Each structure stands twice: as C-alpha cells, then as structure tokens.
Image (tube, rainbow, N blue to C red):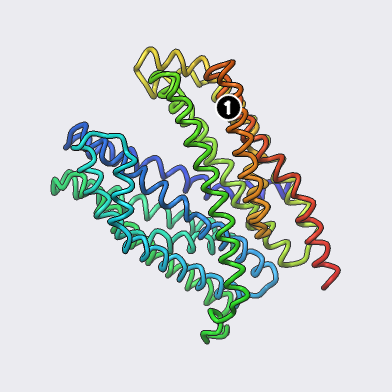
C-alpha cells in the first residue's frame, strides 16, 4: 500500500492544479456576463476555444520534456536535466514567436472556420489579437511544467497553476469590471498572467536545478548536441501527430452528434463535462506514471518499472470505477444543474450510462500514455492514436446508422478501449528495450 499511497500523494497536487482551470472559465464568464452581452460571451467562448486547439497541438513541449527529464534524473545526470530544460524552453519560445509572426494568417483561418455572427467574430478577433502575444510565454511554460513533473515537483506545479489562474482571475475582474475593457480586458489579463507565470516558473526551475546541480557545466555545447536535439524533435513530432489524432476524434464525436439535432448535440456536450472532470483525476495519475517510469528507466530499475505499472493501473482503475459510479448516482441532478432545457435534460439522462462507461474504460489509455511518455516511445503512441481514430470513425459510421446517438457513444467507448489496447500491444516493446538497456549496461 505504500507504493499506492506515494502515487496518490504525488498525484494529488496535479489533480488540484487541474481543478483550478474551470474556475478561470467561470470567472471570465461571470465578469463578461455582468458587463457585456451575449455577443461578448460568445466571443470569449470561441476565442478561448481557438487557443485551446492551438496550444493543445503543442502539448508535446510538456510531455516529451517530462520523459527526458525523468530519465535523466533517474540516472542522476542533473546536467542533462538542465540541458533538456534549456532545449525545451528555447523550442517553446521559438514556436511561440512563430505563432505571433503568423498571427494574421492564423486569425483569418480561425475566423473562417467559426460559424458565428459578424459581431461575435469581431469580438473573437479582438480577443485573439491581444492574447496571441502570450503565446511564447504559454508554450515555454509547457516546458517548465514538463521539468517540474519530470522531477516529481508536483507541489511547485500546483503553486504555479494557482498563481497563473489566480492572477488571471484578478486581472480579468480588474480590466473588465474595473476598467470596462470587455473582451479586450479578458485577453489582456490572460496574456499578462501567462508571462508572469512563466517568470515564476523559470525562477522555480532555476532554484531547483541550482540545488540539484550546483557545479554543473555552464557552457553552451548542450544545444550543439545534434543527436539529442534531433531525438527531442522527432519525439515531439510523433506526439504532435498523436495529439492531432485525439483532437480529430473529439471533433468527429461532436460533429456526428450534431447530425441528430441541437438537443442531442447539447446533451452530448453536457455529458462530456463529466468526462472532462474525470480526466482531472486520471491525468494526475498519468503524470505521476510519466515521472516514475522515466526515473525507473534512467536508473535501470526494471523491478521498479513493473511495480509502478501494476500499482498505478490498480489505483487509476479503482478511481475510474468510483467516478463512474459517482456520476451514475448523481448524474441526473448534475445534468439539471448544468442545463434548464427540458429536451436537453431528457436526452442527457438517456445517454448518461454511456458516459459513465466511457469514464470506467478510459483509465487504461491514460495510464499507458503515461508509460510511453515516460519511456519517450512516441512513435508507438502516434501509431496507436492514428489506428484507434480510424477504428472510431469506421465504427461510428456503422453504429450510428443502426443505433443513432447510442451508436455514436458505443463507437466513442470503443475508441478509448482501442487506444488502450493498441498501446498495450506495444508495451512488450518498451519492456524489451528496457531489458536490452540493462544487458548493455
């Protein structure tokens, strides 16, 4: 039980940090809701959606950094930890600057894809033009988060997220309610908070690394190591494809649901809030698995590697079961709390068991994602995600034709199951590679 407790204790700050994210959306909605109109609310909702898609595509900056840092830390090579942090940080800045430089093109494409009124699109453009200047900070902060998770500094991560979201809320209230800047104020508060959090994160990482590696080599050859730089680039590329496959999967689910009418589309969206809430917990365990697997590989401890796999799966599986039972029990009143539309309530209640089943079966994909990130085996993650997406699309085409929205949910459940099973298919390769490294050393 000690191992289970250690995993849960390390994951708890991550779960709390994740839980602060919805509070920011609620605060933004409340601030605009009391000072603006429906067009302003629509503008910040769609504007935030644009940045969610934009930034999620570069989530590899967090994930690959975690794996490389954890392996270096497990090997006791804290000079390499510093080098990984520098490579990832510069990569985040470079991509962020590129997004700023391409802001006009990105903005035009985003507005073209959005189905909204001209007034709402004008608000989205205002929001985008201001917030895009926070892109270098946000993407570099991804690298900072990867370093903190890879080193197991989850309490530092919690404080960083609290500062980011707390400052963001305070600035948004000041700019919107105090200065009446509306949508521009929301974007301005977010951009300032992103840069402030980056500075705090850099300070945290600097202090940690100075403690772990006080006499490390301060020269520049860390960036000239083309082999390690190329390894990071290829790993990031594979993770990016994997992430895009996930984005397409969720977009496909939403788009297919829209075919069954507005009430069904809205009901599916409500049920996805339960799925997202559950992800806060399962992501927390997955992050810890990334760190522990990476450290075990770096330290050449095969027994620890296998022990972490077993204990994390047991803990995440039990948590997924509890969450599924929780939402099955309180789902109806929760649905009523999220919507007052009678038709949406009826449809959401009808498909609530499917959402609970998705939550129950999703934990395995989360945990194995953590394993492959910690082992920096991104090619297998890419292949599993693309394959499971193809299966999902094929299943949804067949099942929705016969069972409608129920068929769509069944296909969605099969999607997360196939993701987990596909990664499980590749798992022996990770173990074999680990065993080979042990023999070579």
Residue 329 appears in view:
no
Tell me the element at label 1: helix
**Most foreground residue, 74 or 407:** 407
Name which residue lies at 66% across and 45% down: 384
390 vs 294, nearest the viewer: 390
Quarter of the image with the C terminus in it:
bottom right
Task: Please give left or right for residue 97 compared with residue 67 in the image.
Answer: left
State whether residue 37 is above or below residue 158.
Answer: above
Q: Is residue 237 left or right of residue 169?
A: right
> From where the camera sits, is residue 66 visible?
yes
- Judged from this view, the residue extending furthest toward the left is 179
The N terminus appears in which quarter of the rendering?
top right
Find disc 1 in the rendering and name its residue.
396
Q: Quadrant of residue 414?
A: top right
Q: Position of residue 133 (x, y in %)?
A: 29, 60
Q: Position of residue 74 (x, y in %)?
A: 68, 67
Residue 30's quadrant in the figure?
A: top left
Q: Position of residue 248 (x, y in %)?
A: 50, 40
């Amino acid at each position: 039980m000690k191992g289970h407790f250690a995993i849960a204790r390390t994951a708890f700050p991550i779960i709390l940090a994740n839980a602060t994210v919805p509070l920011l959306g609620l605060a933004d909605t409340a601030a605009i809701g009391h000072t603006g109109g429906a067009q302003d609310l629509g503008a910040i909702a769609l504007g935030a959606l644009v940045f969610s898609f934009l930034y999620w595509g570069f989530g590899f900056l967090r994930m690959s950094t975690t794996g490389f840092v954890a392996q270096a830390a497990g090997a006791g090579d804290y000079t390499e930890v510093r080098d990984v942090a520098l490579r990832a940080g510069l990569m985040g800045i470079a991509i962020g600057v590129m997004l700023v430089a391409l802001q006009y093109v990105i903005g035009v494409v985003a507005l073209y894809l959005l189905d909204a009124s001209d007034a709402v699109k004008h608000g989205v453009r205002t929001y985008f033009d201001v917030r895009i200047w926070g892109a270098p900070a946000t993407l570099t902060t991804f690298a900072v988060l990867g370093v903190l998770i890879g080193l197991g500094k989850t309490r530092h991560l919690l404080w960083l997220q609290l500062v980011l979201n707390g400052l963001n809320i305070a600035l948004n209230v000041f700019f919107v309610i105090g200065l009446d800047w509306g949508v521009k104020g929301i974007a301005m508060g977010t951009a300032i908070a992103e840069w402030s959090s980056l500075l705090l994160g850099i300070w945290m990482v600097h202090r940690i690394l100075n403690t772990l590696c006080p006499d490390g080599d301060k020269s520049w050859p860390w960036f000239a190591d083309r082999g390690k730089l190329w390894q990071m680039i290829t790993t990031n590329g594979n993770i990016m494809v994997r992430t895009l496959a996930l984005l397409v999967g969720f977009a496909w689910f939403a788009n297919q649901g829209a075919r069954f009418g507005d009430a069904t589309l809205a009901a599916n969206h409500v049920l996805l809030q339960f799925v997202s809430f559950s992800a806060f917990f399962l992501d927390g365990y997955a992050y810890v698995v990334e760190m522990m697997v990476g450290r075990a590989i770096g330290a050449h401890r095969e027994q620890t590697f296998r022990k972490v796999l077993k204990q994390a799966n047991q803990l995440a599986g039990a948590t997924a079961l509890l969450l599924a039972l929780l939402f099955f029990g309180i789902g109806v009143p929760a649905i009523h709390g999220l919507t007052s539309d009678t038709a949406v309530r009826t449809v959401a209640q009808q498909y609530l068991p499917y959402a609970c089943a998705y939550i129950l079966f999703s934990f395995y994909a989360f945990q194995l994602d953590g394993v492959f990130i910690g082992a920096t085996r991104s090619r297998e993650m890419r292949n599993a995600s693309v394959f499971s997406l193809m299966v999902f699309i094929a299943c949804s085409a067949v099942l929705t034709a016969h069972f409608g929205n129920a068929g769509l949910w069944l296909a969605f459940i099969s999607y997360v199951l196939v993701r987990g099973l596909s990664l499980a298919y590749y798992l022996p390769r990770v173990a074999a590679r680990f065993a080979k490294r042990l023999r070579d050393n």
